[in-house]
């Protein structure tokens, strides 16, 4: 016997009661600033922790034609209003003494050449992010399986010659990644942040994740 089609069209009108079946109505869409105001009001009414994180969920359109398979990806952006309490540990790979000095002066947790490879493989040292200059990248291949998505790459802005600029990005940068198949879920602020803080971080995240 065929199953009955229980699908029903959503009602066009808005609900008039405080309690209703959500599936019967289209989900409301709010402008960013309106949504932020609502979030802050809910926090006050519910007496929840004011410093809890605010998350942005972004669903990607995977229906567009692609020349090749799009793998899960990781990105790092510099939010206009950083909210992390700690600075990320960044390791710099270079064999030039002057570049090692520049890296250390700009806040690198570790800086050096191939002598760091075995220490990383043995878990003696580690970092949140790893950046490198192009001249050394071929010598870092033994680390590819160990570092995986954190292995320095040009398209992740972690492989280049401007060490201070890369360090600036990754020391306070915010990392996001595609989870499951087409969902990005990431922190963008805390509830107690100002409306301008929240809205600007959200817009920045949306802009760069769409690149």
Image (cartoon, rainbow, N blue to C red):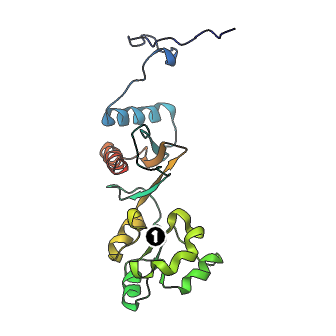
Check disc 1 and report the residue beneath it.
152
Q: Does residue 131 appear to the left or right of 30 in the view shown?
A: right
Q: Is residue 110 visible?
A: no
Q: Position of residue 28 (x, y in %)?
A: 39, 24
Q: Position of residue 84 (x, y in %)?
A: 45, 58
Please name the residue shown 36% across and 37% down the image. Answer: 36
Location of residue 174 by image quarter:
bottom left
Location of residue 124 by image quarter:
bottom right
From the viewer's side, name the closer residue of 197 and 45.
197
Marks counted in the figure total 1
Q: Is residue 95 visible?
A: yes
Q: Position of residue 101 (x, y in %)?
A: 39, 87
Please name the residue shown 50% across and 81% down the image. Answer: 139
Q: Does residue 113 appear to the left or right of 121 in the view shown?
A: left
Please name the residue shown 37% across and 85% down the image. Answer: 99
Q: Secondary structure at mark 1?
A: loop
Please name the residue shown 66% across and 10% down the image. Answer: 2
Name the outermost residue toward the right: 1
Relative height, residue 40 to residue 171 (above, below): above
Q: Residues within 10 Å of mark 1 (few under 14, many from 20)?
A: many
Image quadrant for the N terminus? top right
Name the outermost residue toward the bottom: 97
Name the outermost residue toward the front: 67
Location of residue 13 by image quarter:
top left
Q: Position of residue 45 (x, y in %)?
A: 47, 30
From the viewer's side, name the closer residue of 51 and 147.
147
From the viewer's side, name the closer residue of 60 and 123.
60
């Amino acid at each position: 016997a065929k199953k009955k089609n229980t699908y029903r069209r959503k009602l066009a009108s808005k609900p008039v009661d405080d309690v209703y079946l959500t599936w019967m109505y289209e989900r409301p869409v709010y402008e960013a600033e309106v949504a932020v105001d609502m979030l802050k009001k809910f926090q006050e009414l519910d007496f929840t922790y004011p410093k809890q994180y605010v998350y942005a969920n972004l669903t990607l359109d995977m229906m567009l034609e692609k020349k090749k398979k799009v793998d899960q990806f990781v990105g790092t952006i510099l939010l206009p209003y950083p909210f992390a309490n700690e600075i990320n540990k960044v390791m710099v790979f270079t064999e030039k003494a002057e570049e090692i000095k520049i890296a250390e002066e700009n806040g690198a947790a570790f800086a050096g050449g191939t002598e760091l490879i075995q220490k990383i493989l043995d878990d003696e040292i580690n970092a949140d992010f790893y950046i490198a200059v192009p001249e050394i990248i071929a010598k870092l291949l033994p680390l590819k399986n160990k570092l995986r998505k954190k292995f320095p790459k040009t398209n992740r802005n972690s492989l280049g010659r401007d060490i201070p600029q890369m360090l600036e990005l990754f020391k306070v940068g915010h990392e996001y990644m595609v989870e499951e198949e087409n969902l990005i879920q990431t922190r963008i602020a805390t509830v107690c942040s100002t409306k301008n803080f929240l809205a600007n971080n959200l817009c920045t995240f949306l802009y760069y994740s769409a690149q």
